[in-house]
Image: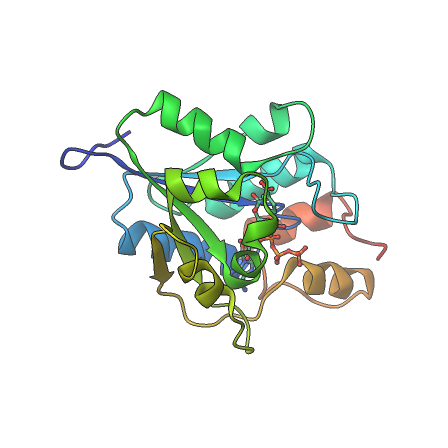
Amino acid sequence: MVVSGTAPRVGLFGGAFDPPHVAHVALAEAAVRQFQLDVLYVVPTGRAWHKARNLTGAEHRLTMAQLAFKPVTRAVVDEREILRPGPTYTIDTLRELARDLPGARLHLLMGEDQAASFTAWREWEDIARLAELCVARRGAQETDGVAALRALPGARVHDLQLPRMGESATDIRTKLAAGQDITRLVPAGVASYIERHRLYLTP
Ligand SMILES: Nc1ncnc2c1ncn2[C@@H]1O[C@H](COP(=O)(O)OP(=O)(O)OP(=O)(O)O)[C@@H](O)[C@H]1O
Ligand SMILES: O=C(O)c1ccc[n+]([C@@H]2O[C@H](COP(=O)([O-])O)[C@@H](O)[C@H]2O)c1
């Protein structure tokens, strides 16, 4: 890891990445730049307790994340949540990072949809104590996601400067199942991987 100044600035960007799309990559690039991150851990979710659907196999999502985030300076795709048994909780990952990188300034990245449901996350108070929360606007609709986080006592909340982007993995999966073109929505390597492995052919 490259360390600038005294406290290393470390980012955590978790997601199902099913599949990773251009907004994920833009968000990661913007965060590295804005928060001057020394390293950004991009962490595909293992077992997403909070999602109703079954995710695509972890090995596919991991490889697609590696393809997608390869061009992002300082980004490292990390498989710890996939390897950890049981449901995935962000607090476990943050505690590991805090233990392994003592003194680091931890930045948790998320879109505003996740910010809006943040108080449903496991041990969210401890997450807010351990990490600065960096929230990107998402889609065309204003939500009160960022405002909800700002209202939490003690939370350190930052606006992640990203133009509103409408891409969503749900929409991409729907388009693929309908045989529609998604090449502008995902990085080229991800589009080839999806095609080669015949992913998302059914809704
Ligand atoms: N278009 C977007 N703009 C800003 N943030 C986004 C965007 N798409 C996803 N994110 C954020 O990226 C993180 C990972 O998202 P995830 O992998 O669930 O993608 P998704 O597009 O939301 O997927 P799905 O549609 O399957 O729920 C979340 O914090 C989410 O809010
Ligand atoms: O820890 C939790 O309780 C928790 C609840 C909801 C979401 N998260 C994390 O938030 C990240 C984005 O979630 P998602 O659903 O947009 O892929 C991902 O890393 C999830 O593991 C974490």
Q: Residue at x 29, y 44 (%)?
A: 37
On the question of residue 78 being in view, the answer is no
Question: Is the image coloured rainbow, by chain, by secondary structure, or in one colour?
Answer: rainbow
Q: Is residue 121 left or right of residue 130?
A: right
Q: Residue at x 82, y 54 (%)?
A: 201
**The one of 125 and 201 positioned closer to us in this rendering:** 125
On the question of residue 1 being in view, the answer is yes
Give the percent coordinates (x, y) of residue 131: 38, 42
Name the quarter where the C terminus is drawn.
Answer: bottom right
Give the percent coordinates (x, y) of residue 39: 33, 37
Q: Residue at x 66, y 64 (%)?
A: 182
Residue 152 location, quadrant: bottom left
Vertical placement of 100 versus 38: above or below?
above
**The one of 202 and 34 positioned closer to us in this rendering:** 34
**The one of 157 and 62 positioned closer to us in this rendering:** 157
Residue 174 location, quadrant: bottom right
